[in-house]
Image (spheres, helix red, strand yellow):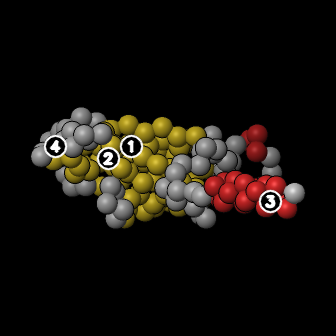
Amino acid sequence: MRYKVGLILILFLGLVACGKKSNPTQSNPTIRFESSHSDCKEPSGTERVDISSSTDTIRVAHFNAHYNTCAKIKVDVVKSKYGFDLFEKDEGKSCDGMCYSDVTTIIYDLSAGTYLIRVFDTTGSSVEQGYAIIQPTEDDGPQG
């Protein structure tokens, strides 16, 4: 009997421990977003990030990102204390070449507010940060 209680306790603790593990760059499933990247292109100016917003949407465009030619660029969007962190990462096969591409992420279904947006490249280095403001709509009611 004592062994059954101990075994049940061990199984319970194992389940609790597994449930608490998390990947800090894993996307929050409640964040609605999509991302895409262009094919290789000639750089048009310098690397830059443009952040814009409209209604309930934030658009983040990372122009002239310098990544592996063969890799597919994915973006993880993680909710932070004041907004969103965007982690660009390359997936798939890699090859010897590097090229420039534009990476675009759209975060949507957002409520009114000011959001800090931080963009990180595939090495985890900060590329840019800025603010996006979602204005209240008539449906949001009076703000107080």
Label 4 or label 3, whichever lies nearer to me, is: 3
| Neighbourhood count class around disc 1 (C-alpha, 10 Å): few under 14, some 14–19, many 20 upward | many
Precedes in sequence: disc 4 or disc 3: 3
Q: Nearer the viewer, residue 140 or 70?
A: 70
For label 2, the residue is 90
| Neighbourhood count class around disc 3 (C-alpha, 10 Å): few under 14, some 14–19, many 20 upward | few
Point out which mark residue 25 bears.
none
Amino acid on which the number 2 mark rests in the picture: Asp
Q: Nearer the viewer, residue 51 or 135?
A: 51
Residue 120 at x, y = what percent?
Answer: 38, 59
C-beta proximity under 8 Å, tags 1 and 2: yes
For label 3, the residue is 3
Precedes in sequence: disc 4 or disc 2: 2
Point out which mark residue 95 bears.
4
Label 2 or label 3, whichever lies nearer to me, is: 3
User: Alpha carbon of mark 4 to alpha carbon of mark 2: how far?
Assistant: 12 Å
Farthest residue to the right: give it.
1
- Classify mark 2: helix, strand or loop: strand
Which quarter of the rendering shows the C terminus?
bottom right
User: Alpha carbon of mark 1 to alpha carbon of mark 2: how far?
Assistant: 6 Å
C-beta proximity under 8 Å, tags 4 and 2: no
For label 1, the residue is 74
Amino acid on which the number 3 mark rests in the picture: Tyr
Total number of numbered discs in the rendering: 4
Residue 39 at x, y = what percent?
Answer: 24, 34
Question: Quick check: 15 left or right of 43?
Answer: right
Q: Residue at coordinates 43% horizontally, 62% vertically from top-left?
A: 129
